[in-house]
């Protein structure tokens, strides 16, 4: 508190002008907005507005003692007998003078300090933090009530919890980060049991039964018994197995049964049991043809394309899920024998096993067989495949009504022009396949994407996935994340490079696992993560401390910015496609970044190093232009094949004048471009063919900039707000 001259006990130029005391709250009883301040030295209470608060120091509140370790868990310190306890440091220990400054030992960057009156209790304190706290006391010599004795008030309570805090829930993550044989980080108690809306309290959705015996011993055993029976009845209805006697020398495969608490959007839906054949035991050419396994699915761009198209047309999207879809596929000539699982109720003769006549889950050819089955059904019922991979089908009636399907394994998205044609499809499809979903409600979840369909369009996001990812990372690391403003630090010392990699394979595997989980939103809904995740992925087998720091940084960014909605709007221009392309010229290889837009909302994007070295900025930009040209030509073909027309070439924003000139004019003899490989001239050919045209944009308006380099917060927000069609304050334009 600042003391006015008339309140000071001593006058003089070098006398202190402020005192340290205790904040008592607002002086509401005096009909004023000032604060009450108690000076414990003079035992006076002041009413003043001239205060400076230090919320880290609570001198009248005793410090809670938290055990860190017992005995010899700190081998690098001094010899500690088993009964010695190491406690967590707290600032109030310095304020309340609880530490014995005569027993201070150095340990690398930390200090081990004894506690007064407790010869077998020590505190592990960071050296800088301890000295800073000592200086903050400002020569404080008045005593504060320390409350009850240390042993009775704190240590007794800590001992009751010692078994709980020793659990190793977060020690593994600490070992990954610190590289120690045993973690020296505070060990936290197990987190509370996760909850799913609609699931009984006490049931952990992350820990389904391990096997049939485990399922029958649980409180929800009856529900699991019905789930097992439903799986068995599905096999019987589709005639998936027949009992046979194996031939001499014929290999018999095993099975495995997976269980899961299924949920959608945080709400429990059902208990799922899935019996799978051990495909890892199959032999090539005996059990399957290695050259006939390819199975296409909808790509991320195609899923968002159908969503954006439905939003533009103002049509609803529906979803169906084919139950036990793989069992509809025929196994063919392959003879696959399996032992029945322990829960299989069917009685077999002695020596008999089961032979799969349908493409049972787990076999290598099962996805291919199912895709062949559903593709043939579509073609036989009048549908035309829109793309070469046969994942998008369309049927158009003479009156102009149409129905579009997008096939993603056993899930299908449907875009009907009216409800009648959708109902007719469901009636016919359900005659051969058993499905769930349909027209009961519009599609709100598809392949992990969350959709909000409304009159002004459709919003797509993965907010639930991102929040769960951040929560899992915090649990693994054992401490909360600090929010970050950008996905990657711009500090010079934060540049990723050839760092000394961790020697432990477990650490490298953990790093790759987290980066892989980040790749999902980076590809589907979060273009702001694309460059950072792509950079982290380069060090999947040689991650070091700097790479872990960068991984933690991007997780902190997701904690601060978990929400990112792609809003595909209704209506818009007749030609909805456009794009931006940019390149960051660097050696040895430049970065290509592009984003394609549908009604000015991101549809697809890429941040990738170029395969060859560019000799100039213009050359790097020119090669990047060929990449976006290929993507836009595919999207144009897809749009036209669906029955819609485009009147003009697709515009592409580019901030390099030389690149634009090369795409518009003949460049074969130009000195700066004559060495470029012919296939890199694809952008030039696309412009000449009328597929795209490039126009000049200012660097400040280049929305692909965030895909080529790490940006500061103002530049990042400029790109993000431009992609999401938001104004400078973050509101929709």
Image (cartoon, rainbow, N blue to C red):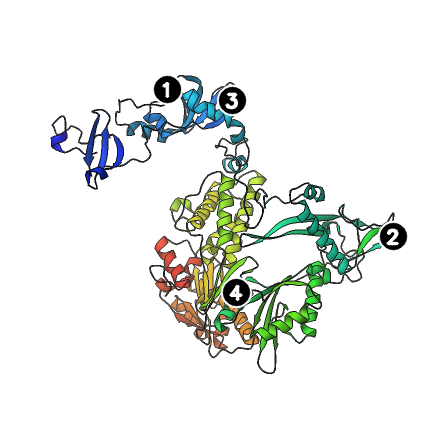
Confirm or deny contact between disc 4 and disc 3 (CB under 8 A).
no
Q: Where does label 1 land, which residue?
A: 100
The image shows residue 694 at horizontal and vertical percentages of 43, 71
Q: Residues within 10 Å of mark 4 (few under 14, many from 20)?
A: many
Point out which mark residue 304 bears.
4
Please tell me whether mark 3 sits on a helix, a strand or a loop. Answer: loop
Q: Residues within 10 Å of mark 2 (few under 14, many from 20)?
A: few
Q: Quadrant of residue 541?
A: top right
Q: Where does label 2 land, which residue?
A: 247
The image shows residue 126 at horizontal and vertical percentages of 39, 30
Task: Work out whether mark 4 precedes mark 3 in sequence or the reverse, and give the earlier one.
Answer: 3
Q: Quadrant of residue 667?
A: bottom left
Q: CA distance from mark 3 to mark 1?
A: 20 Å
Task: Work out whether mark 4 precedes mark 1 in sequence or the reverse, and give the earlier one.
Answer: 1
The image shows residue 461 at horizontal and vertical percentages of 49, 58
Please tell me whether mark 2 sits on a helix, a strand or a loop. Answer: loop
Q: Residues within 10 Å of mark 3 (few under 14, many from 20)?
A: some
Q: Split into 4 quadrants, where in the image is the C terminus?
A: bottom left
Point out which mark residue 286 bears.
none
Task: Work out whether mark 2 precedes mark 4 in sequence or the reverse, and give the earlier one.
Answer: 2
Q: Pick out the residue farthest to the bottom.
A: 398
Q: CA distance from mark 4 to mark 3?
A: 58 Å
Compared across the picture, whether 441 is left or right of 666 comes to right
Q: CA distance from mark 2 to mark 1?
A: 81 Å
Q: Where does label 3 land, which residue?
A: 71
């Amino acid at each position: 508190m600042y003391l006015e001259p008339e309140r000071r006990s001593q006058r003089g130029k070098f006398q202190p002008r402020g005192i340290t005391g205790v904040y008592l709250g607002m002086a509401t009883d005096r009909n004023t907005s000032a604060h009450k301040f108690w000076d414990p030295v003079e035992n006076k209470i002041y009413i003043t507005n001239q205060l400076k608060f230090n919320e880290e120091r609570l001198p009248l509140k005793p410090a809670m003692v938290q055990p860190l370790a017992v005995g010899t868990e700190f081998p690098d310190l001094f010899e500690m007998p088993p009964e010695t306890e190491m406690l967590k440091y707290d600032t109030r220990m310095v304020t309340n003078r609880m530490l014995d400054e005569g027993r201070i030992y150095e340990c690398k960057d930390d200090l081990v300090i004894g506690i007064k009156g407790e010869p077998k209790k020590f505190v592990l304190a960071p050296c800088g933090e301890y000295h800073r706290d000592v200086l903050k006391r400002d020569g404080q010599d008045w005593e504060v009530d320390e409350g009850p004795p240390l042993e009775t008030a704190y240590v007794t309570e800590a001992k009751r919890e010692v078994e709980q805090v020793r659990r190793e829930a977060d020690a593994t993550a600490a070992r990954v980060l610190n590289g120690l044989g045993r973690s020296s980080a505070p060990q936290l108690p197990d987190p509370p049991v996760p909850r799913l809306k609609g699931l009984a309290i006490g049931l952990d959705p992350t820990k389904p039964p391990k096997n049939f015996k485990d399922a029958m011993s649980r409180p929800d055993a009856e529900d699991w018994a019905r789930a097992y029976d439903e799986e068995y009845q599905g096999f019987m209805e589709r005639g998936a197995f027949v009992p046979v006697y194996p031939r001499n020398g014929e290999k018999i495969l095993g099975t495995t049964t997976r269980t899961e608490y299924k949920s959608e959007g945080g709400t429990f839906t059902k208990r799922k049991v899935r019996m799978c054949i051990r495909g890892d035991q199959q032999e090539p050419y005996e059990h399957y043809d290695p050259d006939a396994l390819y199975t296409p699915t909808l790509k991320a761009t195609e899923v968002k394309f159908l969503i954006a198209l439905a939003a533009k047309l103002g049509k609803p999207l529906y979803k169906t899920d084919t139950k036990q879809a793989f069992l509809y596929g025929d196994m063919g000539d392959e003879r696959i024998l399996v032992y029945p699982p322990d829960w299989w109720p069917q009685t077999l003769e002695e020596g008999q096993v089961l032979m799969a006549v349908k493409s049972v889950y787990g076999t290598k050819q099962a996805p291919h067989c199912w895709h062949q089955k559903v593709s043939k059904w579509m073609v036989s019922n009048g549908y035309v495949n829109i793309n070469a991979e046969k994942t998008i089908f369309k049927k158009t009636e003479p009156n102009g009504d149409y129905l579009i399907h997008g096939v993603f394994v056993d899930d299908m998205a449907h875009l009907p022009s009216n409800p009648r044609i959708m109902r007719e499809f469901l009636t016919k499809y359900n005659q051969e396949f058993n499905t769930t979903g349909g027209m009961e409600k519009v599609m709100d979840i598809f392949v992990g994407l969350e959709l909000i369909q409304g009159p002004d369009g459709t919003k797509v996001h993965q907010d639930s996935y991102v929040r769960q990812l951040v929560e899992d990372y915090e649990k693994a690391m054992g401490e909360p994340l600090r929010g970050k403003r950008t996905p990657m630090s711009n500090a010079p010392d934060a540049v990723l490079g050839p760092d000394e990699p961790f020697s432990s394979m477990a650490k490298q595997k953990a790093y790759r696992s987290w980066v892989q989980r980040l790749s999902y939103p980076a590809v589907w809904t979060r273009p702001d993560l694309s460059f950072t995740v792509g950079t982290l992925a380069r060090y999947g087998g040689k991650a070091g401390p700097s790479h872990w720091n960068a991984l933690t940084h991007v997780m902190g960014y997701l904690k601060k910015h978990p929400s990112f909605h792609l809003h595909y709007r209704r209506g818009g221009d007749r030609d909805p496609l456009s794009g931006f392309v940019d390149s960051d010229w660097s050696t040895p290889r430049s970065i290509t970044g592009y984003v394609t837009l549908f009604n000015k909302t991101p549809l697809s994007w890429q941040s990738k190093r170029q395969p060859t070295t560019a000799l100039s900025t213009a050359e790097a930009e020119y090669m990047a232009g060929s990449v976006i040209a290929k993507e836009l030509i595919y999207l144009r073909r897809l749009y036209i094949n669906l029955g819609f027309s485009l009147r003009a070439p697709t515009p592409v924003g580019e901030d390099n004048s030389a690149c634009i000139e090369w795409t518009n004019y003949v460049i074969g003899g130009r000195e700066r471009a004559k060495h470029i490989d012919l296939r890199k001239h694809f952008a030039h050919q696309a412009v000449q063919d009328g597929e795209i045209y490039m126009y000049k944009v200012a660097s400040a308006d280049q929305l692909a900039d965030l895909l080529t380099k790490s940006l500061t917060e103002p530049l990042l927000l400029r790109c993000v707000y431009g992609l999401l069609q938001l104004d400078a304050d973050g509101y929709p334009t």
